[in-house]
């Protein structure tokens, strides 16, 4: 090869392009977001809050510059004590996910609490405002405690310090007073229902002079059963005067507000009934309740950590979340389409009904009968006019005919002569001869004559 000739070189092939479908791209974005943000806390203000028939919470979480959609499924709401609403600033424990049908990223919220005020405090204020508007706390509903109480009813825990304090104070101060206990849970799930049932039982089945409803002190969470609506309404409808003895003096529950009298402690409530003023509280009971509350907090925190670790794993629960969202969306579309179809079918029915009424045989027969009656009336008028005109013409013709009739001429003295028997009219004397027989027609009758003489 000549050194002057150039040596050819190989061209590099361009890199192979990866082409994504929309679904593939959305799926990879979702995987990146969920892997990078499996568990986080987000703070913001709620707006566009709505709750469809499924019971899930849908809302927008926003701040001054941005916003993001959020959803909290119904199963995650069982620990919430307050009701979210627009304008409320909250702190959310959530996972970032992507709703693939719309290509939007969103927050799947597992826990929510208000910022600036606790969840229980917010629920307390919301319920207090509603019940206060109904008049449950009005002073006019308060009743006085009887001066001498013979039978005392107590609704509290059978093993708590409250009942022991009440028995001790009553036995020391008022030994003749009969005490009847309705044992009920005073904290935790189901406590409010048992307390309300105890109040109703005393009113309906075993009336006493005074009721003490309460428990020893504790955290706000421990006392929450006495802020439940069921307990408040049971106290309000009680015919027996109720003393609320919940917690210690700084704690004011809704039961305290609706009760006829509020006592700072169960012991103080017993002193009111027994007409004593000494206030005693059980330190051991308070410490025990604090310990129970602390243990409960530790268990709750451990449960939350366990739930957060479970939610980091991708399992059918994530798929179930998508299906729930799609089900809500499809249900809303189906409901809208059903309404539109029903409206369209109703309009079509009304049009067909109007057309049917317009083409109804009875209606057409009625219209035809009306037209027939009108035509018959016009025919009668028309025939009457024709008959009248014909009668007039006939009368005029008869007059004219009568004037031209030979009979009329005969009546004036003229006659008609015809040959006999042929009856040919004779108008000239040359038509007959002498001895011919002729017939003379007169106005009345006729003559048969023999011609004697013919004159021309």
Image: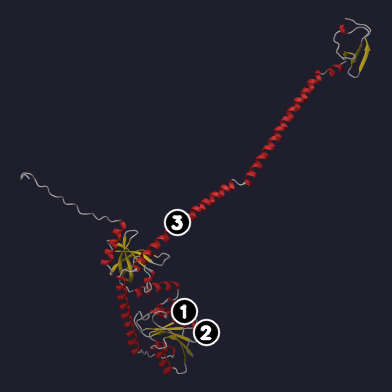
Residue at the extreme front of the image, as rendered: 1
Q: Nearer the viewer, residue 90 or 15?
A: 15
**Image quarter hosting the N terminus:** top left
Q: Secondary structure at mark 2?
A: loop
Q: Which residue is mark 3?
A: 337
Q: Nearer the viewer, residue 79 or 236?
A: 79
Q: Nearer the viewer, residue 364 or 191?
A: 364
What label sits on residue 234 in the rendered view?
Answer: 1
Residue 80 at x, y = what percent? 37, 73
Residue 346 at x, y = what percent? 51, 53
How busy is the neighbourhood of tag 1: few (under 14 within 10 Å), some, or many (20 plus)? some
How busy is the neighbourhood of tag 3: few (under 14 within 10 Å), some, or many (20 plus)? few
Q: Secondary structure at mark 3?
A: helix
Q: Considering only order in the chain, which callout, 1 or 3, is on the residue closer to the N terminus?
A: 1
In percent of the image, x 34 and y 87: which residue is there? 288
Q: Which residue is mark 2?
A: 205
How far is mark 2 from mark 1, CA to CA? 15 Å
Q: Secondary structure at mark 1?
A: helix
Residue 352 at x, y = what percent? 55, 49
In percent of the image, x 33 and y 60: which residue is there? 100
Residue 143 visible in image: no
Residue at the extreme left of the image, as rendered: 3
């Amino acid at each position: 090869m000549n050194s002057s000739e150039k040596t050819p070189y190989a061209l590099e092939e361009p890199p192979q392009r990866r082409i994504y479908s929309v679904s593939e791209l959305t799926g990879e974005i979702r995987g990146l977001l969920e892997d990078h943000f499996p568990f986080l806390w987000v703070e913001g203000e709620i707006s566009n809050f709505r709750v469809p028939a499924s019971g899930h919470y849908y809302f927008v979480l926003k701040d001054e510059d941005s916003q993001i959609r959020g959803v909290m499924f119904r199963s995650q709401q069982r620990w919430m004590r307050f009701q979210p609403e627009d304008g409320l600033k909250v702190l959310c424990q959530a996972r970032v996910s992507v709703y693939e049908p719309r290509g939007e990223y969103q927050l799947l919220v597992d826990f929510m609490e208000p910022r600036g005020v606790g969840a229980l405090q917010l629920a307390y204020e919301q319920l207090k405002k509603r019940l206060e508007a109904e008049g449950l706390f009005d002073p006019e509903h308060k009743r006085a405690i009887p001066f001498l109480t013979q039978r005392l009813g107590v609704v509290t825990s059978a093993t708590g310090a409250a009942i022991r304090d009440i028995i001790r104070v009553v036995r020391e101060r008022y030994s003749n007073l009969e005490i009847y206990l309705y044992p009920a849970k005073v904290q935790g799930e189901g406590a409010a229902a048992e307390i309300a049932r105890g109040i109703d039982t005393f009113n309906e089945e075993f009336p006493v002079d005074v009721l003490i409803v309460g428990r020893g002190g504790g955290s706000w969470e421990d006392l929450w059963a006495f802020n439940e609506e069921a307990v408040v309404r049971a106290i309000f409808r009680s015919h027996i005067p109720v003393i609320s003895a919940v917690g210690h003096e700084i704690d004011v529950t809704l039961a305290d507000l609706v009760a006829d009298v509020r006592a700072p402690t169960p012991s103080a409530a017993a002193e009111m009934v027994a007409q004593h003023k000494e206030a005693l509280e059980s330190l051991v009971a308070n410490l025990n309740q604090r310990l129970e509350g602390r243990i409960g907090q530790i268990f709750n925190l451990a449960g939350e950590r366990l739930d957060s670790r479970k939610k980091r794993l991708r399992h059918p629960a994530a798929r179930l979340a998508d299906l729930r969202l799609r089900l809500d969306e499809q249900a809303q579309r189906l409901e809208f389409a059903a309404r539109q179809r029903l409206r369209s079918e109703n309009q079509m029915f009304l049009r067909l009904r109007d057309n049917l009424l317009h083409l109804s045989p009875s209606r057409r027969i009625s219209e035809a009968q009306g037209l027939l009656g009108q035509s018959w009336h016009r025919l009668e008028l028309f025939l009457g006019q024709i008959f009248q005109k014909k009668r007039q013409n006939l009368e005029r013709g008869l007059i004219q005919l009568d004037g031209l009739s030979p009979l009329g001429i005969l009546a004036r003295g003229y006659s008609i002569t015809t040959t006999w028997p042929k009856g040919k009219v004779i108008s000239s004397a040359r038509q007959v001869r002498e001895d011919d027989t002729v017939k003379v027609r007169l106005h009345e009758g006729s003559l048969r004559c023999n011609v004697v003489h013919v004159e021309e």
